[in-house]
Amino acid sequence: MRPDTPAPVFGARSPRLSPAALAQTIDALTLAGRRCVLLLVSLHRSDRLAALAQSRASREVIGEVMRRVEGMLRSSDRYALASHEELWVLLVDPPGESLAELAGRTLRANLTRPIHVTLGDTGSPVRLHPAVGGAWQPAGAGTDAMTLIAAASEACRESEELESRVRIVTAQSSTEVNQRRQLEHELREALFANELDVHFQPQVSLETGRCTGAEALVRWTRRDGSRVNPGLIAAICEARGLMTQMTLFVMNTTLRHLMAWNTQGIDARVSVNLSAVTLADPAFPSLVGHALDTWSIAASRLTLELTETAVVRHEQSAMQFMKEIRERGCGLALDDFGTGYSSFNYLRQFPLTELKIDQSFVRNLATDASDRRIVLALVDLAHTFGMHALAEGVEDAPSAQALRELGCDLAQGYHYAKPMPQAEFIAWWRSFNRVPARESVATP
């Protein structure tokens, strides 16, 4: 919150404003085309009842909260007490969204320290368990105060489900908000009507040169013919509580195709991506087992992919989740390894079966000696912990050859094929593996 000090906020003197005045300040910043971040803090006070009664001790608590906040602000920053449980902090002209994340974590850490006041005869300190939601407004975004406050409030609500209890989002203009709501409505309808699709990107064994599996990827074409970015689909599902339903749709669709492939002589394993939300669902391993039984698919042919970020966000629940999944016989892959926290401890304590090397290390593998050393280290690391190494983003033959020389087990990328609908995947698989077509048996 401190280091660089931008221009003052239109002559304001005191860092504390009323909620209405702070909203007016946001609108003034918007008109001036300036950046800002609104942090909305839900305090979750242990003295909630005393605060409702507005006791003297509870007022002392608020006084200490204000002192801690003011001690962190720059001269241009402002804050407001929306209620005895809610605090708004406005950061003016921050360099970027990453600073908002840092500011939110720092603010939460400062507010978490016990506040020593006398409450009745107990003498116990007051403790806060803050949740921080932030809305970042880039320069020239044109977001009004009400939209920014609503975005920060939603982010605060979502942050309560995270172990860090801090979530920062980028605010959208009213036009973008309306478009997003329309998209969310259509996605919900498409999901309930099974109108989404699943495409498959081949995964090739570098030792044998044969396709041994595929990654299942969700796709959605709207009724007007436009295609929606898969990342946006996932973001909407996470924000609206639809992620488990979408993941089950992808998994069941994938297993249904696997059952059909069995009758056509295609023995492939398939990977399905999981989000942090799904990882925190204690019922999901049972749902996986039920789906495998429904489609009569061996658990060894299904691999569930987790990202480092998801594991870190739900580290405790992740351990139990992975244990149950491995007991059922499914594989577990750690996706995008090397781009996040990259703790070797995760590889040691979690029962992973596959390490996916991020495409950022693979893209220039054939010409960049540093990337080559990194990939070699990651491949050796995977093998040390008894895992297969799979490289993503393989886009040319030299990269594939380099991976083969480095001992990498599997590869996927546009060098082999883009994600395809399942019918195209079947034809591609037969052609690539030089397997003649055979008659399929009708399946329900």
Image (cartoon, rainbow, N blue to C red):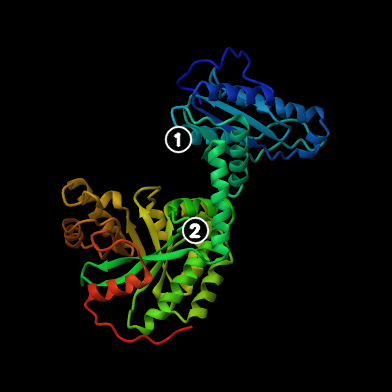
Image vertical order of residue 287 relative to residue 140, above or below: below
User: x and y percent of residue 377 in the render?
Assistant: 25, 54
On the picture, is 9 further left or further right than 363?
Answer: right
Q: Nearer the viewer, residue 51 or 274?
A: 274
Whether label 1 touches label 2, CB < 8 Å: no
Badge 2 is on which residue?
223
Q: Quadrant of residue 428?
A: bottom left
Badge 1 is on which residue?
98
Residue at 44% x, 79% y: name it: 297
Q: Amino acid at mark 1?
A: Ser
Residue at 53% x, 15% y: name it: 8
Q: Earlier in the sequence, mark 1 or mark 2?
A: 1
Image vertical order of residue 336 relative to residue 54, above or below: below
- Is label 1 or label 2 in front? 2
Label 1 Cα neighbours within 10 Å, binned few <14 / some 14-19 / many ≥20: few
User: x and y percent of residue 70 in the render?
Assistant: 60, 22
Image vertical order of residue 166 relative to residue 115, above or below: below
Residue at 73% x, 32% y: name it: 83
User: x and y percent of residue 337 in the render?
Assistant: 35, 53
Label 2 Cα neighbours within 10 Å, binned few <14 / some 14-19 / many ≥20: few
Image vertical order of residue 154 relative to residue 67, above or below: below
Residue furthest front as drawn: 224
Look at the numbered disc 2 and give the secondary structure of its residue.
Answer: loop
Q: Quadrant of residue 52?
A: top right
Q: Nearer the viewer, residue 427 or 245?
A: 427
